Image (spheres, grey):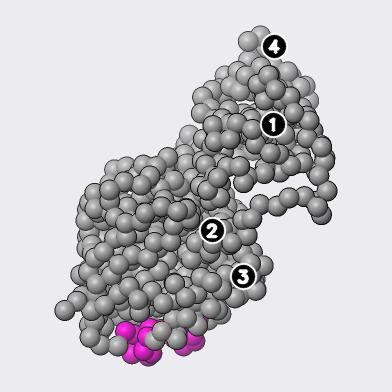
Amino acid sequence: MLAPPQAAWLWKTSPPTVTAVPDPVAQVAQLKLELPPAPKPMGVYRPCVVLGGFASELSAEVFGAEAGVGARSAVGAGSLPGNIAVEIEALALLVYPDRIEENLRRMVRLVGDPDRLRPHLKTVKMPEVVGHKAIAAENPQPRWRSDTGLTLTRGVTTETIPPIDSRNSPRMNLKRTFRFLIAVLACAAVGPTADGCTTFVLQKDGRLVFGRNLDWHVGEGLLIANPRRVKKRALVLPISARETHPAQWVSQYGSVTFNSLGRDFPTGGMNEAGLVIELMWLDATQYPPPDARPELHVLQWTQYLLDTCRTVEEVLATDAEVRISQDSILPQHFLVCDAAGRVATIEFLEGKRVVHRADNLPHACLANSTYAESMQQAAMRQGADGSQTIPDGDGSLERFVRTAARIDAFARADQDVVDYAFDMLDGVNQGYELDAHSTVWSVVYDIGEKRILFRTHNHREIRRLELSQLKFDCAQPVPVWDVLSGGAGDITGRWTRFTAELNRETARKNVTHPAIVRTFGDLSALLAPVSGYAENFTACEE
């Protein structure tokens, strides 16, 4: 590549790295450069030199001559993070064929017959999307709908699609199926957003704690002491007509879990052996395809692990015995820690389980991006002199980098580990706004002490629950605590008795909450099967 001496100086100062892009880029729309003042005699000519010298050519080299060249601009800056020589911001329209194909196949599974699909084309009428092989394979002659009218070319066939008056247009009879799909999503009490939930593990001087923020629209929930010796059968709600194979098990360990939609559907918790499991939203999740293993909904998989495992090794070994149902549309990944301080992240990517642990887990924390993506972002923030740029913002990667930096700093901190953990949770707290996506619970598991500490958006006082004081006896009443109730200090003895009515009322508060109704619509049909699960699918072992 030819470039004047000034561009060569910049190239030597900060050589670009050309990285292969696994997914195609439809079009780079704009390249924007930010540059600090250059050494004399370059002066104000440096932005133009760089832009003309290599920025657009580098983009074309990575993304292709047609797709990689877009509009260009350059601005001067007083300084840039980490004293880097240039920052290039690229805006592009991306197409992910594997995700498009999976979404389309799920749509076909939902309605049972591809002929019932009537795709509605809006502004983006890209052939990579509307002519995708997933549609062609399922239905070679689909019916299209458009509000604007367009000409669609597929192979050698050209079809003119006239505008359709939406008031008189034919509609798919998907209302019931769509509501059911959303109901399955809502069961997790975690919304479809990448901006929610942060977890981490801290260890020093024999102390071991696990921290977790739950970020969601609704704070109502129950802390439930789940007993031992309970026979259970998974509640599997398939989104397509197929034979199910629900898992069956007996709980070996008592546990305390946080539940928004009822008993045995937790977002996380700790068992009496000191095993902690918490889940977080991850858009990239793809659960394994059906096979001979019994299946569970993703939330019940969390309870299954707390019921049957005491170590991270045992958690990982269950992959040979059960699987998360592929109909669990809720995409999650997990941070797991046991009483010996062993930590692992568990993700399901492209239908395969991905585990990070031991030397493959340099930072024991997780947000809402894959662990590999998160570590890559942390590495990009690392300067050549060992310094690190700590980002602001509530995005997943920003929260991960801040949390990882605080974990590193803990070794030098002169502060109680529990206090430090709550300070860390405050550092990634997204605040609280009524009926909006907010941090509703902050939880610290003191694993060595078998103690759960938490505070909520409406009561900042820290409440404490001692697992060592609980009997976890299947023949005795099941203790529950209202997560949003007030008070401070030890609440272990201030429990109420679990009842079916209390379970249903907690689920009802979540399902009928204004923010949930606005987002998901009427989910009242979900209340009976989920809130009645404990009555209909569990029993004390004889």
Front residue of this view, candidates 29 and 487 = 29
**Quarter of the C terminus within the rendering:** bottom left
Q: Residues within 10 Å of mark 3 (few under 14, many from 20)?
A: some
Which residue is the site of mark 4?
A: 4
User: Would residue 338 be found to the left or right of residue 257 on screen?
Assistant: left
**Residue 462, x across and y down, in percent:** 44, 79
Type of amino acid at the residue the image marks with label 4: Pro
Can you see residue 116? yes
Type of amino acid at the residue the image marks with label 2: Leu
Q: Nearer the observer, disc 2 or disc 1? A: 2
Which residue is the site of mark 2?
A: 181
The part of the chain drawn in magenta is 478-498
Q: Residue at x 40, y 59 (%)?
A: 298
Q: Quadrant of residue 222?
A: bottom left
Circle 2 sits in a helix, a strand or a loop, which is it? helix
Disc marking residue 126: 1
**Residue contact at pointers 3 and 1, CB within 8 angstroms:** no
**Residue 500, x across and y down, in percent:** 41, 84
Q: Earlier in the sequence, mark 2 or mark 1?
A: 1
Front residue of this view, candidates 410 and 532 = 532
As drawn, which residue projects farthest toward the top? 2
